[in-house]
Amino acid sequence: MVQISAKQVSELRQKTGAGMMECKKALVACEGDLEASIDYLRKSGIAKAAKKAGRSTTQGKLVARSQGNTTVLLEMLCETDFVAKTSEFIELSNNIADKALSEFKVDGDIAAPLGEMVLDDIKVLISKIGENMHLRRALRWNTNGQIGTYLHTGVPYGVMVEVEGECSPELLNNICLHVCASNPTYISPADVPAEFIAKEREIAAATPELQGKPAAMLENILKGKMNKIYKEICLMNQPWIDDEKTTLAAIAPAVKVKRFVRWLVGEELPGEKEDSQEE
């Protein structure tokens, strides 16, 4: 068999944009002939897929899958809403979610290793449909309690919530609906960063109407202002979705929310704007 050097692989990657393993496979098949390898990749559709990899993807689909004590939530992106609704894209997204359940054991973010595992499958569909697409996010949670999910049928929001304690399926579903509708940032005031609290207190204390207040009175006012903020940003303190006069903490004191996420297909993620500006 012809020995293929790293330099040859690198050169073919630069010319086609294909992945390292695809380039090496093409070079081996073409006995090191660069031009023949380019044609090989073009015929297989891989070079075509690679050229589309830089195109913007803001549409897509969220998929949730559960098996036993494990739940997966992932986001697949493509270029247009039309493709996002095709049976091929939906089938690919569902198959990737199934692999996330069956091929991994870890708890947490599996987007990178899962993306590598299904890269060839994605490239095949890119070549067939002619649109860029990629796996953007993937979470796999294991639990000793319960995990609920909710996928909104209109605006493509997706929610995943883990709870422990006495929580009926109906209540867990309502918690997911609440997270989708109310968009909390934290679970409870105990989870709010001290730096955020200090900054909000400093801003409130600097307002003209609080100048000259006795220390004890000022402290009570600041506590009241922070409680209002907690009602806006903390899941357990927000007005409950079914009854705004109460809260989740009040109606379900035995339920402990361990973690939650709320995704929107194509939403800007932290660091993305800066990265695009640098480019």
Image (spheres, rainbow, N blue to C red):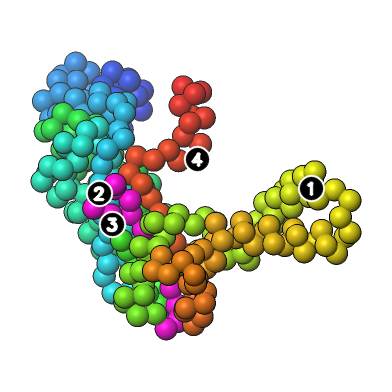
Q: Residues within 10 Å of mark 2 (few under 14, many from 20)?
A: few
Which disc, if any, is residue 28? Answer: none
Across and down, in percent, residue 153 comes to 23, 53
Mark-to-mark CA distance, 4 and 3: 22 Å
Q: Is residue 51 left or right of residue 195?
A: left
* Res 193 quadrant in image: bottom right
The residue carrying mark 1 is: 209
Secondary structure under the numbered disc 4 in the rendered image? loop
Secondary structure under the numbered disc 1 in the rendered image? helix
Query: First in sequence: mark 1 or mark 2?
Result: 2
Give the foreground label among 2 and 4: 2
Can see residue 119? Answer: no
Q: Identity of the amino acid at label 2?
A: Gly
Give the foreground label among 3 and 1: 1
Does the stretch in magenta take in 273? no
The residue carrying mark 4 is: 270
- Who's the residue at 49% across and 23% down the image? 277
- Who's the residue at 52% across and 74% down the image? 249
Which disc, if any, is residue 154? Answer: 2
Q: Identity of the amino acid at label 3?
A: Leu
Q: Residues within 10 Å of mark 3 (few under 14, many from 20)?
A: many
Query: First in sequence: mark 2 or mark 4?
Result: 2
Residue in the foreground of this view, choosing between 212 and 16: 212
The residue carrying mark 3 is: 151
